[in-house]
Image (spheres, helix red, strand yellow):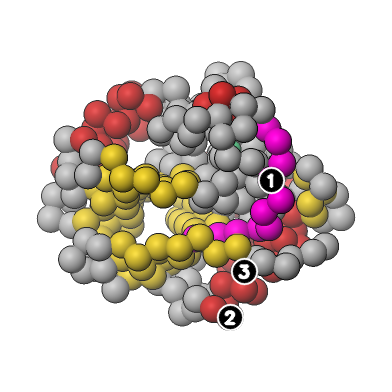
Amino acid sequence: MIRLLQFTDTHLTADPAASVRGVRTLPSLEACLAHARRRHFPADAIAVTGDLVQDEPAAYGALELLFDRLGVPVLLIPGNHDDPEELSRRLSHQPFQFGGTRVMGAWAIVMLVTWFAEAQDGEGRLGAEELRRLEAALEAQRDRHVLVFLHHQPIPMEAAGLDALGLQDAREFRAVIARHPQVRAVVWGHAHQALDVFRGGTRWLCTPSTCMQFRPRDPGFAIDDRPPGYRVLDLHDDGGIATEVVWLEGYRQ
Ligand SMILES: [Fe+2]
């Protein structure tokens, strides 16, 4: 079995005392990591799936310090609030991996970049090149189970405001996934809430943020009462996935 932990939308600020929508994001990430280390370590890898910083690349330094010391490979992809060039420049050394594919036993983990320079308002796009890379990765991993991570939601989440800022080429993405039945799950962040549905033989999972959450199915961006969270994914050799969202119940700042 492979154990993966996913932390997403950490939204770190250059000033650690600053807050994003009422939550100081560094202490809430630290609380998530401490909780995970207590409850769910050892892990085989960690995925950090975008919006690592709140538009302030200086905050990559704090992220580096926090994840460097865990002794576990850390797979990274950017979100709309990231600076992918700066992120890959600062966090490509061991134990970090920016994008790409990572083979772990019976599984291959494919990390996709949905950040694109022309984005207007936080939406995402894979584009032809990243879609080709996905297709090639899936062709090369026909004999493994595959888990795909990306930042933006590739299916509607029944929330008009968020859905307008989803993956613009979701249809093309889902067509590639549909051609490759070894893809067991697609996992993302961005929407700051939890979702776990099966469609077309694939499992589609959204993971809440390590800071604040949006209320599910809200047409705008109403803040939910839910605390910080992260996801545990146990990937079994037969392709089965045991996963749960862990909420930091009782978390107060
Ligand atoms: Fe995002």
Q: Residues within 10 Å of mark 2 (few under 14, many from 20)?
A: few
Q: Residue 10: percent from the left, percent from the top?
A: 65, 52
**Residue on which disc 3 sits:** 33
Amino acid type assigned to the residue bearing label 2 in the image: Arg
The answer to which of 177 and 192 lies nearer the viewer is 192
Judged left or right of residue 177, residue 194 is right
Residue 59 in sight in this render: no
Judged left or right of residue 156, residue 57 is right
Within the displayed image, which quadrant is ligand 1 positioned in?
top right
Amino acid type assigned to the residue bearing label 3 in the image: Leu
**Residue on which disc 2 sits:** 38
Whichever of labels 1 and 3 marks the residue nearer the N terminus, that label is 3
Q: Residue 91: percent from the left, percent from the top?
A: 56, 54
* Range covered by the magenta-colored residues: 221-231
At mark 2, the secondary structure is: helix
Q: Residues within 10 Å of mark 3 (few under 14, many from 20)?
A: many
Residue under the image location 45 percent in, 63 percent down? 244
- Per the rendering, the mark at residue 224 is 1
Q: Residue 116: percent from the left, percent from the top?
A: 51, 27
Q: Residue furthest right?
A: 17
Query: Between tags 1 and 3, which lies in front?
Result: 1
**19 versus 232 height, above or below:** above
> Magenta: predominant secondary structure element?
loop
At mark 1, the secondary structure is: loop
The answer to which of 244 and 128 lies nearer the viewer is 244
Check if residue 224 falls in the magenta segment. yes
Quadrant of image for the C terminus: bottom right
Check if residue 69 falls in the magenta segment. no
